[in-house]
Image: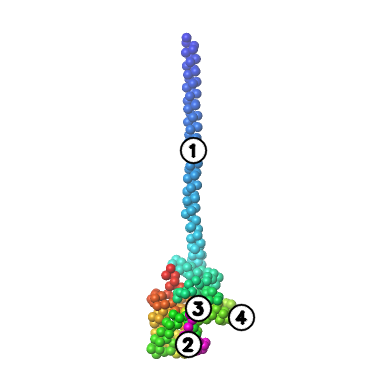
């Protein structure tokens, strides 16, 4: 009777051991299954996060194109403030003059910007050119109607002030400007020509909004106006008639044109007043407007 009892006990032990082993194996299997099930989910989440990150980062890459120009300009000009770097890059001054010419779009605007980065179309001629008071040395000179009317008012005011103001040059066609520039290149070389003439399309005279003036018919030199006793009066009252001195002595770094004491530009009274009040040039006015 004792024998089967002992066998049963041994069988029971084996059974219990096997159940325990089976349980442990099951535990391992279940835990592996859990790991298998959760792993792809985590990976998937990581993948999704990556996509979201890339979506966020992509527009940044486009922005960084602009800031790369700013960074390069800042490195080349450590003397400039951050604000000044941003301003100059916005004016395209980090690019070689004439290397990135864009065509002027707002041809009917009194505020159109024509310089070594923005050029007028080759065949462009304003439709509303009219003659203005001229010194006669270049025959009859023309300006756009609104600019001409404002200029005639300035001429009248100057007469009341006791001096003669008139135009020696105003509208110049693309072809005329081309002739001037090409002649300069032929006689003196491109570097010299670029210093003294603007390339065709980049001359403000093609807008019909600009005028080179004489005072009291002093033909000695265009810069002679600077020495006229009423020149300060003229500068102080330009804005009342919608004009600015387009290339002032202290703005060559923005205009890239040497000072021209004789070159007036019509921009309308509102802009002219604001430009005068802030001592801006046209490039600065347009920068601060945007
Ligand atoms: Zn001029």
For marks 4 and 1 on the same chain, the one whose residue lies earlier in the sequence = 1
Q: Residue furthest front?
A: 127
The nearer-to-camera label among 4 and 1 is: 1
Measured Cα–Cα span from mark 3 to mark 4: 29 Å
Residue indicated by mark 4: 186
For marks 3 and 4 on the same chain, the one whose residue lies earlier in the sequence = 3
- The boundaries of the magenta stretch are 128-140
Residue indicated by mark 1: 37
Q: Position of residue 4 (x, y in %)?
A: 49, 12
The nearer-to-camera label among 3 and 1 is: 3
Q: Is any atom of residue 178 visible in this view?
A: yes
Residue indicated by mark 3: 126
Q: Secondary structure at mark 1?
A: helix
Crowd rating for badge 2 (residues with CA inside 10 Å; few <14, some 14–19, many 20+): many
Measured Cα–Cα span from mark 4 to mark 1: 81 Å
Q: Secondary structure at mark 2?
A: loop
Residue indicated by mark 2: 134
Q: Position of residue 6 (x, y in %)?
A: 48, 14
Measured Cα–Cα span from mark 2 to mark 1: 90 Å
Q: Position of residue 20 (x, y in %)?
A: 47, 25
Q: Is mark 3 within 8 Å of ligand 1?
A: no
| Residue under the point 57% across and 77% down | 191
């Amino acid at each position: 009777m004792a024998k089967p009892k002992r066998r049963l006990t041994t069988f029971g032990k084996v059974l219990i051991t096997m159940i325990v082993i089976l349980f442990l194996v099951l535990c391992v299997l279940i835990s592996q299954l859990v790991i298998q099930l959760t792993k792809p989910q985590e990976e998937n989440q990581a993948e999704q996060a990556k996509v979201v990150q890339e979506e966020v980062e992509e527009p940044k890459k486009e922005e960084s194109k602009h800031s790369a120009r700013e960074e390069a300009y800042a490195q080349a000009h450590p003397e400039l403030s951050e604000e000044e770097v941003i301003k100059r890059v916005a004016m395209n001054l980090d690019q070689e003059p004439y290397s990135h010419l864009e065509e002027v779009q707002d041809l009917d605007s009194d505020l159109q910007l024509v310089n070594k980065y923005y050029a007028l179309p080759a065949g462009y001629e304003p439709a509303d050119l009219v003659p203005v008071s001229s010194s006669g040395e270049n025959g009859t000179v023309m300006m756009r109607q609104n600019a001409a009317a404002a200029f005639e008012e300035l001429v009248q005011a100057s007469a009341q002030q006791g001096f003669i103001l008139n135009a020696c040059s105003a509208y110049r066609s693309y072809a005329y400007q081309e002739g001037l520039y090409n002649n300069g290149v032929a006689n003196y070389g491109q570097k010299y020509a670029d210093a003294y003439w603007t390339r065709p399309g980049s001359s403000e005279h093609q807008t019909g909004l600009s005028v080179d003036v004489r005072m009291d018919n002093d033909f000695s030199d265009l810069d002679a106006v600077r020495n006229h006793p009423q020149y300060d009066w003229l500068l102080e009252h330009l804005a009342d008639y919608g004009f600015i001195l387009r290339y002032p002595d202290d703005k060559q770094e923005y205009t890239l044109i040497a000072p021209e004491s004789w070159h007036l530009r019509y921009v309308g009274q509102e802009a002219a007043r604001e430009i005068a009040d802030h001592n801006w040039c046209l490039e600065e006015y347009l920068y601060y407007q945007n």
